[in-house]
Image (cartoon, rainbow, N blue to C red):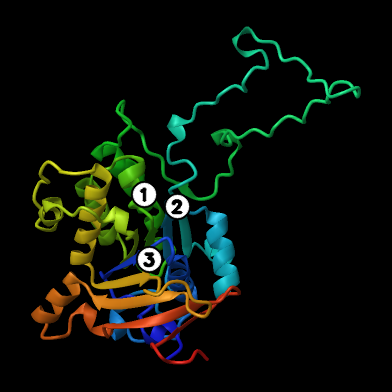
Amino acid sequence: MGKLHDVLPLHPTSDSLIVVTSTLGAPSTWLAQSYVAENLRPQPTQAADIGGVEGGVNGSGRGVVLVSFVTEERVWREGIRRGMGVDISLYIKKGKFAFVDGLTRLFEDAYIPRPPTPLHAGGLVARPVTHGRTGPIPPRDPMPSMLPTPPSQQQDDGAQIKLELGPDGKVSSAALRTGVLGSVANAIKAVEGNGGGKPLVVVDGIDFLLSAAEAGAWELWEVVMDIRELSHALLLFISADTPLLHPATSLSLSLFHHEPPPTPRGPLIETSHSAFLTTAVHNATIVVSLRLLDTGVAKDVSGVMRVTIGGDGEEEEEEWGGKGQGREVEEKEVLYYVADVGGVEVFDRGEMRR
């Protein structure tokens, strides 16, 4: 062992859903970068029925749409270049890659410029402070503005998701579909229009909307399913920190059975996040979980990666006599190490790193 593709298929089969869970201590950015780079790279020509790949197998790689709600494009661009040796700028020019920014202008309509605090607030006049016989202390240089960059001054690179919030500060179902699904669908069509079939879609941090805009778990999951129908395969990266998963209520089961959600009990964010993650795992073809070692942080181990077949993969295996889309994965748990200069190494417990 030693290579990531020995444990996890980096070229998902058609219509598959791979759910990746991570924590603050064991982030998943490196894995998302691996999927993006591996699918953009030119691949050897192969038959269309191998691995369930259709289109994009003529040696030119597959188109990729990356949607991120927590990281800016420049960070992804630099990380993929340094860590994976792939310059996505070249693929943007070819129309094989599109980035959908779900962070920079997500709440642009809520931007309200605030004037700097006046020096004479409340009728009080600021007087110079004396210090001994040396006279008044010279004033400090003005502090730099901490206000966000106005939208007119921001750089416009690619598609950007914008959400309209209601008077209560929440996003409606219609606004969620228009803002998120509309932007992602346009990016998918643009990449698909350049040939190579449906693109691989990587969505990072969409669960952020559950807390930031109080999006409903049911409404957000419907958007995810619509994105899945438009893509070759969908990778969903979700946070799975313990505070976000407790308490789990009957809302999770209602979403899984496609029933209207009941009135949630307990904190809304915890309930919605737990329901959304549980539903994603039940519908996933493959589930990848990243976490820290139970014993804490280690110098030569970044974390633990557990790969299992999701609920959808198990159902298809039973239906197809053990030949469902989950067949490409062997359930296992391994350790992994992410190098500072890029590159990932996986190894079993007790095994020495190369």
Q: Is residue 115 left or right of residue 111?
A: right
165 and 94: which is toward the camera: 165
Per the model, the C-alpha gap separating discs 3 and 1 is 24 Å
Question: Which quadrant of the structure image shows residue 321?
Answer: bottom left
Disc 3 residue type (three-letter): Pro
Mark 1 and 2 residues: CB-CB less than 8 Å, in contact?
Answer: yes
Q: Is residue 311 left or right of residue 76?
A: left
351 and 235: which is toward the camera: 351
Picture quarter with the N terminus? bottom left
**In the displayed structure, would residue 156 be above or below residue 345?**
above
Kind of element beneath mark 1: helix
**In the displayed structure, would residue 316 be above or below residue 117?**
below
Q: Residue furthest right?
A: 133
Residue drawn at x 45%, y 82% as measured from the top left: 43
Neighbor class of circle 3 (other Cα within 10 Å; few <14, some 14-19, many 20+) is many
Per the model, the C-alpha gap separating discs 3 and 2 is 22 Å
Q: Which residue is mark 1?
A: 208
Which sits earlier in the primary sequence, circle 3 or circle 2?
2
Which sits earlier in the primary sequence, circle 1 or circle 2?
2
Q: Which residue is mark 2?
A: 70
Q: Which residue is mark 3?
A: 199
Disc 2 residue type (three-letter): Val
265 and 156: which is toward the camera: 265
Neighbor class of circle 1 (other Cα within 10 Å; few <14, some 14-19, many 20+) is some
**In the displayed structure, would residue 264 be above or below residue 57?**
above
Q: Residue furthest top?
A: 123
Kind of element beneath mark 3: loop
